[in-house]
Amino acid sequence: MGCLCSTPLPKLEGFLVNQPPPANGYILGEVASTNAGNMELHYSGGITNKMPAAGAHPTTNPVKTGSSNEIFTVLRAGDLNSKLIRDPTIVRDASGHTIAMLKSDSTTGPVQVGNTYTGYCVTPRFNGQGVASTVDGVSMYTAFRVQNIDTKPTPEGTFGKAEFNVYLMKDAAVFHSDPAYVLTAYDTCSMVAQRHAFALTTSADNVGVAHGSLKGAFSDQITLTVAQGMDAGLAVLAGFTPALLVSEIKVVDKGPNGVGMAF
């Protein structure tokens, strides 16, 4: 049962609307293609209510299809409960090749509202696009950016939900000034659910393109359903950013009972 202040995640039925496939391809290529129809993915959000053991990160989060085929893995960097994260979150395909990355745009911290995480991939999004970063010896190109737009990047501060803008590249050098999508994180009275139950809608038309639900209020197991034509890789990676952005806007310290407390 949710808290009295919580806002329920939209029901999946009737939420998703088919989209035209991206003109410049999916950020993870055919690994995350939804050309054939809606795609259902299953993975761990990488957070539990139990503090991770020292040295137990990055957290390995295999992303599997509904038929349990592993298609890629998100290696989430850092301990979200204790420190600001500056290491990249790396994505590898089923063969172990590095294919994408999420990385904070901050160099000092904690920062405030407006902080961002950028997603990168191994294939240029536009002709003439320059290499933005290198990880594992692999060149990365800027693909999208997620920005916190709430005063607090947690649903408690916004009556059960928190919103984030998702921007796409306009050309080889700059982002669109208007967001392509809005990611909304929902609170179901769980430290995990606050950061991982989410819906992704188009910014202009407010129609659903991805729906990430949890198996239970205290679970970190996500079922993500992505609309036909929507970039499933982008939806998964964007879904990881609310938790990462929490560590950007406030330092979390352990209280007397050992539970993470936000300040």
Image: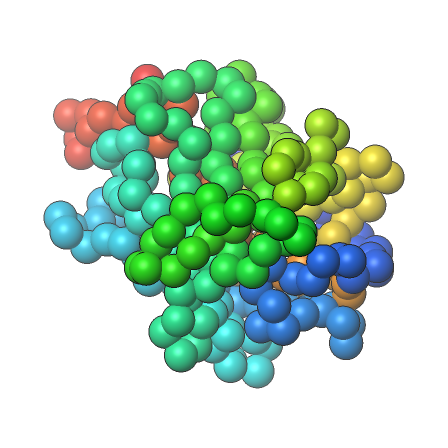
Q: Give how far across and how far down residue 114 sits, in percent.
A: 53, 21
User: As rendered, which of 67 and 3 lies closer to the eye?
Assistant: 67
Q: Residue at x 64, y 43 (%)?
A: 172
Q: In which quarter of the image is residue 83?
A: top left
For the N terminus, give its image quadrant: top right
> Splitting the image into 4 quarters, where does residue 162 fall?
top right
Q: Camera-side residue: 22 or 250?
A: 22
Q: Can residue 45 be spotted in the picture?
A: no
**Res. 227 image quadrant:** bottom right
Q: Residue at x 56, y 30 (%)?
A: 147
Q: Which colour scheme is used?
A: rainbow
Q: Residue at (77%, 49%) from the top-left corner?
A: 208
> Residue at 77% across / 36% down in the picture?
203
Give the percent coordinates (x, y) of residue 212.
60, 54
Q: Position of residue 123 (x, y in %)?
A: 56, 60
Residue 107 in sight here: yes
Figure check: 181 above or below 218: above
Among all residues in the image, which is located at the extreme front?
A: 128
Q: Where is residue 88 in the image (x, y as percent from the top left)?
A: 35, 46
